[in-house]
Amino acid sequence: MSNYKIILSGGGTGGHIYPAIAIANELKSRYPNAEFLFVGAKDRMEMEKVPQEGYDIKGLWISGIQRSLTLKNLSFPFKVISSLWKARKIIKSFNPDIAIGTGGFASGPLLYVAASKKIPTLIQEQNSYPGITNKLLAKKARKICVAYDDLERFFPKKKIIKTGNPVRQDLLNIEAKMVEAKNHFNLKHGKYTLLVLGGSLGARRINELIEKELDFFDTQNVQIIWQCGKLYYQQYKIYNHTNNVQVYEFLNDMGSAYAAADIIISRAGASSVSELCIVGKPVIFIPSPNVAEDHQTKNAMAIVSAKAAMIIKEEDLEVDFKNKFSQLIASQEKQKELGENIKQLALVNATKDIADEVEKLLKKE
């Protein structure tokens, strides 16, 4: 039987949406007649990104619980009740053979309802430190696909399979595309290219740092591809094409951006970290301190402890940044070591391996 019905849920940020889309694409190539439905949070980016990829999506009225006491938290119980009610309706009418969750608050109600109706559920945990949604869902899930070691602290050991995180397939052999990619961005071949990534919305502190150090980068013979994010583009676009700088709201062709880069400065969200392992370039992580359980710092430290990247915390940027960056630029050896070591950590078959686990659950039913 290949006309399976597969429901996927995850969202809030690109880090939860892209893995879900990658898994769906892989399953669709195996089961062209399967029917797919995504479930996301009503007002978040998945409502736009998923249809662009050709899949249907339904939205729940749900958001995360704020960690500070705010009025938003008063509506949280109502949102949960509303979402559970809507998730029941969706599951009843779609009647899926399997439910897959990639994290983010929207996947909570949906997978909870699916599991309570004895539909097999699989969760994919991208971080080295799981979020609250997946910790709660783990009790009922049949399989938990993870990207880091030592997650037995949070999940039942017998359910865990280490697969890695799904990433864009166009990143697999970017070394060959470097010259072409530099031409694509009209970059100079005799300069170092720095790629700056702050996530799809942008990272305020990274943007402030880049703005402040533009003259310093100039003295280091560095040209910059600066993805400043949706929230900051209006503020920083004045620097576009000044001092060897290109400013982007969002980079649609990430493959070329990675291929053109010599050094990368990035946040440490799980999907970014997984992509950077495959890309295999020297990375300086500046983790966001404002995320649940400080998981970005934990993600970055998992790489740094393997001597495969550098980390500078936001509070240390003033003191450490120039010093660490100029040391890295000056040492070809250090660049090579970081690039080679981070590549060792890449799990390139993640999407395929997760789809294999989904297939085993489907065949069991």
Image (cartoon, helix red, strand yellow):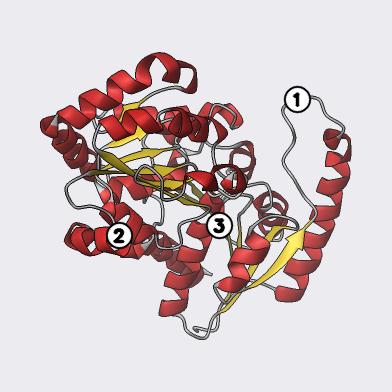
Disc 3 or 2, which lies upstream in sequence? 3
Q: Which residue occupies 44% across, 39% down?
A: 157
Query: Which residue ends up furthest to the top in the rendered image?
Result: 319
Q: Secondary structure at mark 2?
A: loop
Horizontal and vertical percent position of residue 195: 35, 45
1 shown above or below 63: below
Q: Which residue occupies 27% across, 30% down?
A: 219
**Residue carrying label 3:** 17
319 shown above or below 212: above
Alpha carbon of mark 3 to alpha carbon of mark 2: how far?
Answer: 31 Å
Disc 2 or 1, which lies upstream in sequence? 1
**Residue carrying label 2:** 186
Amino acid type at circle 1 is Ser
Look at the image and tell me whether residue 139 can be seen.
no
**Residue carrying label 1:** 68
Q: Nearer the viewer, residue 330 or 189?
A: 189
Q: Which mark is residue 202?
A: none
- Total number of numbered discs in the rendering: 3
Q: Secondary structure at mark 1?
A: loop
